Amino acid sequence: MSDVPEISPEGVEAAVADALAAIADAPDTAALKQVRAAHQGEGSRLAAFNAQMRSVPKERKAEFGKLVGQARGRVTQALVAREEELAEAETHARLQAESLDITAIGSRTRQGARHPIALMQERICDHFVAMGWDIAEGPELEHEWFNFDSLNIDEDHPARQEQDTFYVDPAERHLVLRTQTSPVQMRTMLERDLPIHMLSPGKVARTDEFDATHLPVFTQAEGLVIDKGITMAHLKGTLDHLAKQLFGEEAKTRLRTNHFPFTEPSAEFDLWHPTFSGGARWIEWGGCGMVNPHVLRAAGIDPEVYSGFAFGIGIERALMFRSDVQDMRDMAEGDVRFSEQFGMVV
């Protein structure tokens, strides 16, 4: 500090003037920090004047102390005021840079759409909810007992072969990708009190080819009713009601004798489609029948007291009938242009 002159009013005023000029010229808060260090830090002239107070005669300490203290105060006030001014200006500039013109035309992004299979599934579920039925769901990765054994499907049944079913390693876990939503019906019979009126929609998997009429993963909706005095007449009335709800008042169903392990007696049922694009006709729709007594016993239900019916339909087939979709692959490929045809754009 040997190059710092002795304390004098002129020297102190000059140091203050230089500091105030530098503060006023600081363009931003970063530059102001450097000015603070240069004119208020340990190496500044004002700091040197303050250090020289140790060698000032006692009779003049008050005079020079007041002089240096007021000088440092003026510089501090100027720094605070300039810092507030610069911070406000920088905040305003940042807000301007980040502002959005809400009147400007937004960028056009392609909208998505609800998938028609999901819409059809919801539509079918809504019809049964309106009748007081419950909607039940279950795991898509299912144990063999629920998927086959409990449904009266023998070990040598073709459906249990690897060319029809996706098995999951390791084999000793006995897990499969469910081939139907009927396991949900068995879980419902085991878990819920009677009577039961339920629909179980969901994805299922089979080793089918991926072509215009088959998908390896598709969607089913299976219905189940268990109560006292249930007959095939109740089943037929339920199917006719569903057909009318989906395809118009002239729609109806007919039953053709068939065999399914889950039901006895069993039937295929056809739909009379009054508005089919190629003209009104009968179209195969699904399978149904009275729940097999062996299945009721597996669920702990006395078949001498209770009876029930079950049916299953394919959601994709219902969509093909209702909306004249010709190729199932269109439903699985995820092209939004296909979904947009069915409304519910989101």
Image (cartoon, helix red, strand yellow):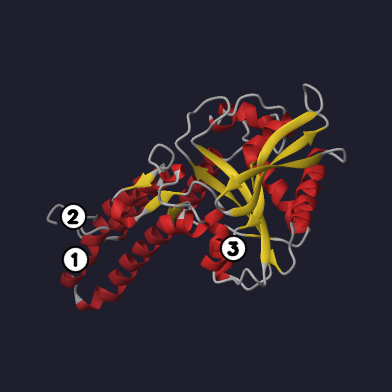
Badge 2 or badge 1: first in the primary sequence:
2
Q: Nearer the viewer, mark 3 or mark 1?
A: 3
Task: Pinpoint residue 55: horizontal percent, then vertical percent.
Answer: 15, 70
Q: Does 277 sit above or below residue 5?
A: above
Residue at 12 percent across and 55 percent down: it is 2
Q: Is residue 220 left or right of residue 46?
A: right
The vertical placement of 296 against 59, above or below, is above
Which residue is found at the position 75% from the left and 62% from the top? 132
Marks 2 and 1 in Cβ contact (< 8 Å): yes
Q: Give coordinates of residue 233: x percent, y percent.
A: 78, 55
Please identify the quadrant where the N terminus is shown. Answer: bottom left
Vertical placement of residue 339 versus 255, above or below: above
In this view, the residue in front, 17 or 137, is: 137
Compare marks 2 and 3 and give the one earlier in the sequence: 2
Name the residue tied to disc 2. Answer: 4
Q: Identify the residue position indicated by label 3 in the image.
A: 293
Q: Position of residue 224 (x, y in %)?
A: 65, 58
Residue behind mark 1: 52
View extreme (top): residue: 278
**Picture residue at 63% right of the left edge, 51% below the top:** 222
Tell which of 153 and 315 is nearer to you: 153
Cβ atoms at labels 3 and 1 below 8 Å apart: no
Residue type marked 3: Pro
